[in-house]
Image (cartoon, grey):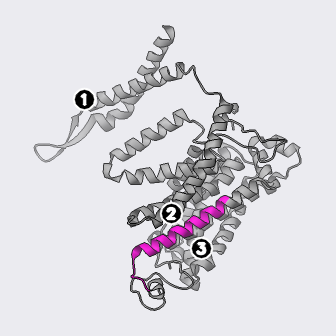
Amino acid sequence: MKHLADNIKDSLIVGGVAFLLFGPFLGLQLTNGTSGNLGLATRPMLLAIAVGLSIVARFLLLLWQDHRTTRVPAVKLAAAVAKSGKYVAPALLIVTITLPLIPGIDNSYIDLGVLIMTYVMLGWGLNIVVGLAGLLDLGYVAFYAVGAYSFALLSHYFNFTFWECLPLCGILAAAWGIFLGFPVLRLRGDYLAIVTLAFGEIIRLVITNWVSLTGGPNGIYDIPHPTLFGLTFDMSGGPGTVSNFFHVDPDPSQRTTFLYYIILALALLTNWVTLRLRRQPLGRAWEALREDEIACRSLGINLRNTKLTAFAIGAMFGGFAGCFFATRQAFISPDSFTFIESATVLAIVVLGGAGSQLGVALAAVVMIGVPALLQDLQIYRMLIFGIALVTIMVVRPRGFISTRTPSVSLGKAKIISSDMISEGHG
């Protein structure tokens, strides 16, 4: 009975907080007065419903936590998740490859797939820094911007093509990753997050105010699209176009499908390189750095090189994604590289499970695909999306796939469950 009283008290406190939060937004409404002036009306019923739902939801959550007597052991649950991943990953890959080939599929779904895979690639790039090396980076959008503006400027001033700029964008972004890594070698945790956040804002302010080079707030337009062995996807259908060469009618879906397979190839390259590096001494050094930096130093691992390589390789894939973003949009501006982009990519990594490649891909589908598919619900789509994210983080606080498989082990590799790590400490 005492425990029940504590749950009721906790639920009422949550109701009071909900009243303070929802009061100005749901309890009040601007109206047109009789003389044409704005008036203020109250909506007590809507506010009472919101507060009541908050109290009931909190109470039910506490009851669910108190009565979880048949909890699956952490190791068995981790093993089940890993076993299902062996089937989910190939199935997801097959669906991804065959999506544009489905007869009659709308071009908007292919374009949405392009957007999702762009964030999958960004998530896998940031996963190297955050998930493998354990370095909290809040300025990842800076490398995204470096890749995009490198391609835009090289194509604008030197007439470079997309395929010529793609490796250069990765190299330039990696160089900026090393440039960021040197000042933060001795920082970790919240201090590292603050410095990387500042770095992302500095890059955005530079491209905003350097008007003579970057165009400032007006951005850069007429960025060339990628070509297929020199063939363009021009809708005119003239000589030198894909439709003329293959004797097919021009269709906007042809360019979208081509972009789709480009970003798919780049994302798979990111995944393949990451998985290969995890099994190399460098990848094991990243994981040692993530688990315990002091122990890592005591084992003789060069922390400087380990951190710099994590920043550089993660930034390189961000530069690749930025180059693709520029050629897909054909226009870029500083508004495309705000802090919210870094926060979104970091949320994808955390929601999917730091260090999990499959988890990041699933989280990108949820974070980017679900809101896009709920466009018809207008303002309620973000409410539904927010409730879904809160529910996921309550049920799976360390992400969709929170298990870790050692890169190297004596005998059969045993899966490590996240339950062995305290929340917020690893």
Q: Residue at x 49, y 23 (%)?
A: 64
Foreground of the two, 295 or 281: 281
Judge from the rendering whether residue 288 lies leftward or rightward of residue 398; answer left or right: right
| Residue closest to the far left | 34
Q: Residue tagged by mark 3?
A: 150
Q: Position of residue 424 (x, y in %)?
A: 64, 35
Foreground of the two, 322 or 138: 322
Q: Position of residue 400 (x, y in %)?
A: 57, 42
Query: Which amino acid is tagged 1?
Result: Met
Q: Position of residue 161 (x, y in %)?
A: 57, 81
Dominant secondary structure of the residues highlighted in magenta in the image: helix
**Magenta residues?**
247-271
Query: Which amino acid is tagged 3?
Result: Ser
Q: Residue at x 79, y 50 (%)?
A: 284
Foreground of the two, 44 or 347: 347
Query: Marks 1 and 2: in contact by CB < 8 Å?
Result: no
Query: Which amino acid is tagged 2?
Result: Thr
| Mark 1 burial class by Cα count in 10 Å: few <14, some 14-19, many 20+ | few
Vertical arrangement, residue 251 with respect to residue 62, above or below: below
Q: In the rendered structure, does residue 263 fall within the stretch colored magenta?
A: yes
The secondary structure type at the circle numbered 1 is helix
Say which mark, if any, is on residue 45. 1
Q: Position of residue 396 (x, y in %)?
A: 56, 36
Q: CA distance from mark 2 to mark 3?
A: 32 Å
Q: Residue at x 50, y 78 (%)?
A: 225
Vertical arrangement, residue 338 with respect to residue 228, above or below: above
Mark 2 / mark 1, whichever is N-terminal: 1
Query: Marks 3 and 1: in contact by CB < 8 Å?
Result: no
Say which mark, if any, is on residue 98. 2
Judge from the rendering whether residue 239 lies leftward or rightward of residue 185; answer left or right: left
Query: Marks 3 and 2: in contact by CB < 8 Å?
Result: no
